[in-house]
Image (cartoon, rainbow, N blue to C red):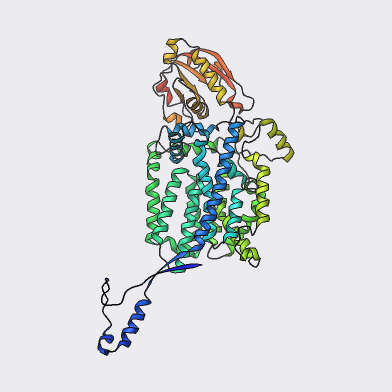
Amino acid sequence: MWCVNLVCVPLDADARLPMPPFPREAKKGGTIAPRIAYASSMTRTTIVRPTDASLRSAVRLALLFFAIKLLIHIAATLWQRHIGMGYFRDEFYYLMCGRHLAWGYVDHGPIVALQARIAETVFGHSLLGIRILSAAAGAMRVFLTGLLCWSLGGKRSAQALAMAAVLSVPLFLGIDGFLSMNSFESMFWMPCLLALIMIFRDEADGIDRRWMWWSLLGVSAGVGLLNKPSMLFFLISVGIALLLTPQRRVLFTRHAAFGIGLLILIALPNVLWQVHNHWPTLEFLRNGREQGKNIRLSPLAFVLNQIVVIGPWGAFVWLPGLVHLLRRQDRRWLGLTFLILLVVMIALGAKDYYFAPIYPILFAAGGVAWQTRFAQRKSVQRDSPLAFAVGIVTMIVGAAIVYPSAAPVLQPQTYWRYAKALHLPDTETENSARAPLPQFFADRYGWQENVDEVTRIVNALSPADRAKVGIFCGNYGQAASLEWLGHGLPTVISEHNTYWLWGTRGLDGEVMIIDRKSSVANIQKYYEEVQVVGRVDNPLSMPYERHDIYLARHRKMPLPPDWAESKIYY
């Protein structure tokens, strides 16, 4: 429904606005008829400002699903605290990066560090507060799915189906439940697609708002590049897809040049940081590929794994959505974007969740496809959000059944019985040693025990040793957890990823607590005196987090000059 607001232009001589001169014919004739004809022509130039009531309805419905998604993660975090489930290892790292704000980091962009800094500043050490921004970003993914569906012509029935499908994706239920950059990806990818869709939609309606939409795309893409490098592959896929279709015309305008220039300008500080630090992110990615860090899936395995992590029930929405996009000439570029990005991710050997941010557009199109297929159904004609209630309930039930495999909401013993009963497939993404629990869960165990053991060792030192001792950790999880959970501990250093860039932090290495998986023989290469002073051995943690702790004295060579050779980007 379109509501029209009219702005009438006064035609009398007393009007405040200046009256344009009558046509010459009207002046010559001396009769009122030409003036009436002229007045009619003036009224036809009345300014029309349309307001789409369907947009307001779509926003209200999207806000409802936004709230549901946010509440799910708030409740999950509170429950995890109740059952003793703590921080995920990467959360510690991002929080420490938030204390060292920069335009770049070795293995992630600056947005997650800024997110962590804001969360710590506002909420302190509250686990819920630390995770709330990521949960809100996940909720925005659902909200944007509703708007994308609306932009493609979907009514409330289609919007509800699309948003329920996104809401029930197991992978999203997992990654949106902790502090990370991954929950933000769709929040930056999808506005780019929404902006392009609206440009074509405005073009069909005779409206020109290209400056506005290209500004949205430029800002969203630029900030998205600061969030995670995968944004670049998405933008390349969109660009290739547009070039392969008649919609390529949108790229060859001054508005497009402005939007592209804006995104480059926003992302430029990170590029300069990379140059200044000798492209550490590229080195990190290269090392991971050459040393086989991640499990590399075959093309078929990658596609099949998508069905698992997105949820088999979701395929009944996103697959029709993909078909819908590919069959429509005006929307084929969206379907090609999905396919091109899929090929790129497989070729790069990417983890399965790197591809996940693209799915909201397919779910949005899937809602439209189902709406079109059942257009004669009375509930669809009434525009009921519950027109596809059976499908919505089925997806929610499916998500509820597998939810404990996506988020750590069960005690270990209960989880093992649950996994055995459901015959859960292996969804690990890295080639590291296995723990009794999936790595996503195991990386939440052992941190407090490690902090307690290191604290005990520090307290047992003599005042002289305590005054100059430092702690040398093997990875960012160990180092950052000591800094976040510890109280009054000595300076912590590590050669792992961005911690290496932070350097020795003033330590000379003369007396060090070595908190890492190593051996006395290996440490004796660097120190005259080495002894085992403690051990951490939580059976639920990852195997490389179970190790002895050493006290080393009298370093054979100075620590700062040796630091350059200790770098580990992996």
Q: Where is residue 39? Give x, y as percent.
A: 33, 80
Residue 244, can we see it? no
Instruction: Name the residue furthest right.
Output: 421
Image: 93 above or below 69? above
- In this orientation, which residue lies closer to the viewer: 455 or 382? 382
Residue 16, can we see it? yes
Image: 431 above or below 41? above
Q: Where is residue 11? Give x, y as percent.
A: 30, 77
Image: 381 above or below 39? above
- In this orientation, which residue lies closer to the viewer: 190 or 278? 190
440 lies left or right of 559: right
Image: 63 above or below 428? below
- In this orientation, which residue lies closer to the viewer: 324 or 78? 78
Q: Where is residue 351? Give x, y as percent.
A: 57, 42
Q: Where is residue 474? Give x, y as percent.
A: 52, 25
- In this orientation, which residue lies closer to the viewer: 117 or 107? 117
Numbered circles on residues, count: 0
Quarter-of-image position of residue 558: top left
Residue drawn 27% across the image and 81% down it: 22
